[in-house]
Image: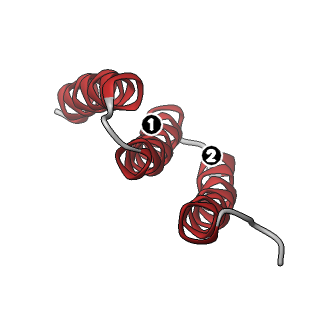
């Protein structure tokens, strides 16, 4: 039962990553590209968590937490760049 759920989760997140990549390349504006990158980070976090569940490993969850923190800081930096044109004042 869990194997089927994991397979579905991997397939769904893989499809989501492909669609986010399409939005990243095709996005009409800078804000669309930033949102695509942020969503890709969230999807990769989901993939890491699913991998941790599949391998029964706790280390993957720590890696997902670190990626979440780095992704948040990156999103804030991108947003600040779009609003002000400079990251560090």
SS for dot 1: helix
Q: Residues within 10 Å of mark 1 (few under 14, many from 20)?
A: many
Examine the rendered structure and indicate whether residue 81 appears above or below residue 8.
below
In the image, residue 79 lies at what x, y percent? Answer: 54, 65
User: Which residue is the extreme one toward the bottom?
Assistant: 89
Examine the rendered structure and indicate whether residue 49 appears above or below residue 13.
below
Residue at 48% in and 39% down: 44
Q: On the picture, is 66 further left or further right than 48? A: right
Q: On the picture, is 6 further left or further right than 63? A: left
Mark 2, mark 1: which one is toward the viewer?
Answer: 1
> In the image shown, does 46 or 26 lie closer to the viewer?
26
> In the image shown, does 44 or 58 lie closer to the viewer?
44
Residue at 47% in and 43% down: 37
User: Which residue is the extreme one toward the front?
Assistant: 85
* Quarter of the figure that contains the N terminus: top left
Q: Which residue is mark 2?
A: 60
Mark toward the start of the polypeptide (2 vs 1): 1
In the image, residue 11 lies at what x, y percent? Answer: 25, 22
Q: Which residue is mark 1?
A: 47
Residue at 53% in and 32% down: 55
* Quarter of the figure that contains the C terminus: bottom right
Residue at 38% in and 25% down: 21
Quarter where residue 22 is shown: top left
Q: Which mark is residue 38?
A: none
Quarter where residue 75 is shown: bottom right
In the image, residue 33 lies at what x, y percent? Answer: 42, 41
């Amino acid at each position: 039962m869990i194997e089927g759920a994991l397979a579905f989760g991997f397939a769904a997140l893989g499809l989501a990553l492909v669609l986010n990549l399409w939005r990243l390349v095709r996005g009409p504006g800078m804000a669309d590209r930033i949102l695509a990158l942020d969503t890709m980070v969230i999807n990769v976090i989901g993939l890491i968590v699913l991998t941790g569940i599949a391998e029964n490993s706790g280390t993957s969850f720590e890696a997902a937490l670190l990626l979440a923190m780095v992704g948040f800081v990156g999103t804030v930096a991108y947003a600040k760049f779009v609003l002000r044109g400079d990251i560090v004042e």
